[in-house]
Image (spheres, rainbow, N blue to C red):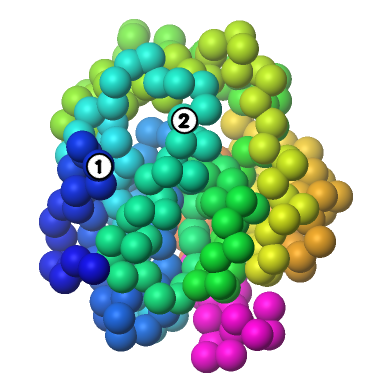
Amino acid sequence: MTTLSPTGFLTIGAAHLEYRMIGPSPEHGPTIVMLHEGLGSAGLWGDFPEKLQAATGAGVFAYSRVGYGHSTPAKLPRPLDYMHVEALDVLPKLLDKIGFRRGMLLGHSDGASIAAIYAGSNEDHRIQGLALIAPHFIVEDVSVASIAEIKTAYETTNLKEKLSRWHKDVDNAFYGWNGAWLDPKFREWDISEYLAYIRVPIAILQGEKDQYGTMRQVEIAQQECYCPVDVTVLAGAGHSPHREAAGETLAVIADFAAAALRADGASAA
């Protein structure tokens, strides 16, 4: 177990991963582990981790995966099973490294998919709930079209400059994610098989105007999961409800966390 400063780096294998730890460390109570989107980082969550900590009283741990933020760059091209690698290899080591005892996973987009793979492949009794913001369980046409559009924007507008604020090697972050999603073979990516094996409550938050996914993702979870699935559709929000409808998103997740993380949450789930 590593003693966690408010900010720092963890060594997982050959990688150094930047992190933020807000509130009590894992040995002192439940922890919400935040898994960022495909172009996210520990920093790009903004002040949402601080607000979440204040609203729940739980510790909040956010980190940047390999290739993102100030973490070690990724080897490109990324393998098309990169989310499986993260969920099955990296995340278990990271949870052990931080001394995770109990809590929940909060994932956005790619991060939500990673959380679902983890919970559906590990009967980890420390996990008491999943909060999934704009999750992907399959690849949709709208996802590929929007990801192709953002590639054009990255190469022709000031988007690269904006993203460089959050990533030490912005090309590595962008093309690692974008290249995988635009590979024709990635159309076969499907993680819905994991959903039937999740044994904790799930909260799904979906923006009504999400440009990267439709309600089909929510329907798949409702069809495949045997665990409770609580769905919130956020009117007017796109792919990032925690930025576009921050107040409502925070309230929904805080209410879910209050139920999932109570002391007897593991037996109640």
Identify the element where label 1 is drawn: loop
Tell me which residue sits at (60%, 81%) in the image.
266
Residue 208 position (above or below residue 225): above
Magenta segment, which residues?
Answer: 250-269
Q: How many marks?
A: 2
Tell me the number on the disc at residue 101: none
- Looking at the image, residue 6 sits to the left or right of residue 218; the answer is left
Sort mark 1 into few (<14), some (14-19) or many (20+) by Cα contacts within 10 Å.
few
Tell me which residue sits at (22%, 28%) in the image.
73
Quadrant including the N terminus:
bottom left
Quickly name the residue at label 1. Answer: 13
Q: Position of residue 235 (x, y in %)?
A: 66, 52
Q: Main secondary structure of the magenta part?
A: helix
Q: Position of residue 239 (x, y in %)?
A: 55, 41
Quickly name the residue at label 2. Answer: 82
Q: Quadrant of residue 238?
A: top right
Q: Position of residue 133 (x, y in %)?
A: 56, 51
Tell me which residue sits at (72%, 50%) in the image.
195
Task: Give the distance between the C-alpha atoms of the residues marked 2 and 1, in whole angstroms.
Answer: 16 Å
Identify the element where label 2 is drawn: helix
